[in-house]
Image (cartoon, rainbow, N blue to C red):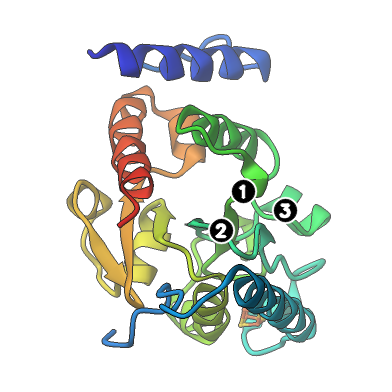
């Protein structure tokens, strides 16, 4: 195990202990590139462009808040559209809101969200620097997986979020998100460990933080995935 690995692992373990997981041991589609910022961009035009995209993202969130395009609208308390930096280099995509997210209107809150924050810090990112969304914006009942038609109904929002945020890298968190983003039924174990492309954006898959809380064996591969993401972001590709 490299030195680079040990410190973030220790931090994650400390974090898990801090939130009550003392018993847990965690070992170590053919569209133009939407993240191209344009060769003629000056600081002023870039800022105006960012502002316009942030406004458009807000308008899309407002539109989604009334959405009843699938049956998930029936049981939700509120739509959990997404959160974070509308001009982020890194976009994280999860499966769908859970009970706490549905109550608070934000993605990745609660223990899994706290762990996600620690994972991001391990690659030198604060949570408010990234953008976080889910493949479905409304909570599936009893936390079941979203169904294929629900994911399809919600896909337009996610695609628009990707177009507006223009991340340089996307990370799919968990099997459902990875399969939905990459348009496949392949197992997560076969999807992670290599780069994919989502609407022109390089994308990786890794384990969902909730799975990390339950299964210690996922910690090392998750860290390896996030190192790849960090290196890609630092590489400025
Ligand atoms: S999950 Fe998506 S498509 Fe379905 S009601 Fe909610 S916002 Fe609309």
Marking on residue 129:
1
Marking on residue 61:
none
Q: Quadrant of the N terminus?
A: top left
Can you give x and y, in whole percent of width and height, for residue 164 in the image?
Answer: 57, 77
Cβ at disc 3 under 8 Å from ligand 1: no
Can you give x and y, in whole percent of width and height, for residue 132 in the image?
Answer: 59, 57
Q: In terms of secondary structure, where does tag 3 sit?
A: helix
- At horizontal 69% and vertical 59% (from top left) the residue drawn is 83
Can you give x and y, in whole percent of width and height, for residue 150 in the image?
Answer: 52, 79
Q: In terms of secondary structure, where does tag 1 sit?
A: helix
Q: Nearer the viewer, residue 184 or 231?
A: 231
Q: Nearer the viewer, residue 237 or 81?
A: 237
Cβ at disc 2 under 8 Å from ligand 1: no
**Within-10-Å neighbours for mark 2: few <14, some 14–19, many 20+:** some
Disc 3 and disc 1 in contact, CB within 8 angstroms: no
Q: Is residue 226 above or below residue 65?
A: above
Disc 2 and disc 1 in contact, CB within 8 angstroms: yes
Cβ at disc 1 under 8 Å from ligand 1: no
- Label count reads 3
Q: Is residue 138 visible?
A: yes
Please identify the quarter of the rendering in which residue 48 is found. bottom right
- At horizontal 46% and vertical 74% (from top left) the residue drawn is 37
Q: Nearer the viewer, mark 2 or mark 3?
A: 2
**Within-10-Å neighbours for mark 1: few <14, some 14–19, many 20+:** some
Question: Label 3, on which residue?
Answer: 101
> Separation of disc 2 and disc 1 at Cα?
6 Å
Q: Say which label, 2 or 1, has the lower sequence index.
A: 2
Q: Nearer the viewer, mark 3 or mark 1?
A: 1
Q: Quadrant of the C terminus?
A: bottom left
Q: Nearer the viewer, residue 2 or 67?
A: 2
Q: Is residue 21 visible?
A: no
């Amino acid at each position: 195990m490299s030195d680079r690995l040990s410190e973030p692992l220790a931090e994650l373990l400390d974090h898990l202990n801090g939130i009550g997981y003392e018993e847990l041991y965690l070992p170590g589609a053919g569209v133009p590139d939407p993240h191209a910022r344009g060769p003629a961009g000056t600081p002023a035009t870039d800022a105006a462009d960012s502002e316009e995209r942030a406004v458009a993202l807000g308008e899309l969130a407002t539109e989604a808040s009334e959405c009843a395009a699938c049956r998930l609208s029936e049981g939700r308390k509120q739509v959990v559209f997404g959160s974070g930096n509308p001009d982020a280099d890194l976009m994280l995509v999860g499966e769908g809101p859970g009970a706490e997210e549905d109550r608070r209107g934000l993605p990745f809150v609660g223990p899994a969200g706290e762990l996600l924050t620690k994972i991001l810090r391990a690659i030198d990112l604060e949570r408010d620097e990234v953008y976080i969304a889910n493949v479905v914006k409304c909570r599936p009942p009893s936390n079941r997986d979203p169904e294929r038609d629900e994911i399809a109904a919600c896909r337009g929002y996610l695609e628009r979020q990707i177009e507006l945020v223009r991340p340089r890298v996307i990370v799919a968190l968990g099997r459902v998100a990875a399969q939905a983003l990459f348009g496949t039924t392949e197992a997560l174990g076969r999807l992670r460990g290599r780069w994919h492309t989502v609407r022109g954006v390089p994308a990786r898959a890794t384990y969902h933080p909730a799975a990390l809380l339950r299964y210690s064996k996922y910690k090392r591969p998750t860290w390896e995935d996030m190192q790849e993401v960090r290196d890609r972001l630092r590489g400025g590709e």
